[in-house]
Every structure is written in structure tokens, then in C-alpha cells.
Image: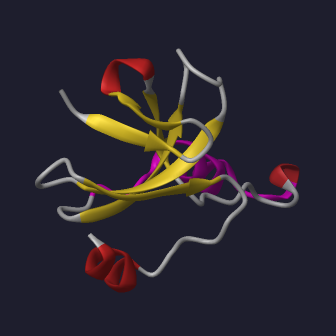
Amino acid sequence: MLLIRCPYCGERPETEFHCGGEAHIARPDTPADISDADWGSFLYTRTNPKGLHAERWLHAHGCGRWFNALRDTVSDAFVTTYEMGTPRPDPISETAKA
């Protein structure tokens, strides 16, 4: 079983978590002022990289808090997890820690 480290609770089984999609997506300051095409792009267009990807995760069956994670989409390995509101860590230094 895959273990995911919640930054608030520690390592827990993957069955306690839900993925919430790509992390660090900024909502437009004035949504009413952007075009329909730009609004649609904000809502539905996401990156889909092969390799390192920043994602939001919910510890649904634990503390109930959201956090961010850097995950390798090829190996499904979590490089690091970090609290919401924290800047994305440097993936090179995080990989060196592993």
C-alpha cells in the first residue's frame, strides 16, 4: 500500500486521501472582466506532465485538511508534501533528500 505523508498527521495509507487536482492555480482577480474563453481555460485547462507535478490533496479520512504535494506521475512516488499557502519547494533539493 502507498503511504502518503500528511504534513499535519504524518504518514498514512493512501485510502485516507483524495486528489484535488493541480496545485498553485491562481483565480483571476476580476473574473467578470475576462473573456468566456479565458474563463473556460481557467476552469478546465490543466497541465498533464510526465514527471514531477504539484497537486492538491485532501486528508479526507484523517484531519480533513488540504495540503500540496510534489508527485512523480511516472513512478507515482511522492517527492514531498507541504502545507497549503507554502511556496512550492525546489524539486531538485527535495529529490536529493529522498
Q: Colour scheme in the image?
A: secondary structure
Q: Is residue 63 one of those drawn in magenta? A: no
22, 87: nearer the viewer? 87
Where does the image place residue 21, in percent across and percent down from the top left? Answer: 46, 41
* Residue 47 is a magenta residue: yes
Q: Is residue 67 above or below residue 35?
A: above
Residue 16, percent from left and from top: 43, 20
Residue drawn at 59 percent across, 45 percent down? 67
- In depth, the one of 81 and 23 nearer the eye is 81
Out of 9 and 32, give the one closest to the viewer: 9
Q: Residue furthest left?
A: 75
State the quadrant of the C terminus.
bottom left
Extent of the magenta region: 33-48
Q: Taking 12 as reference, is 77 left or right?
A: left
Residue located at (34% from left, 18% from top): 15
Q: Is residue 42 above or below residue 86?
A: above
**What residue sits 20% from the left and 53% below the top?**
73
Quadrant in the picture for the N terminus: top left
Pick out the residue farthest to the front: 10
Q: Position of residue 23 (x, y in %)?
A: 53, 54
Residue at x-position 28% and y-position 75%: 95
Q: In the rendered image of this protein, does residue 39 appear above or below residue 57?
A: below
Residue 79: percent from left, percent from top:
32, 61
Task: Indicate the quadrant where residue 29 lies.
Answer: bottom right
In terms of secondary structure, what is the magenta stretch mainly?
A: helix
Give the left or right position of residue 22, taking residue 48 as reference.
Answer: right
Which residue is nearer to you in this view: 84 or 43? 84
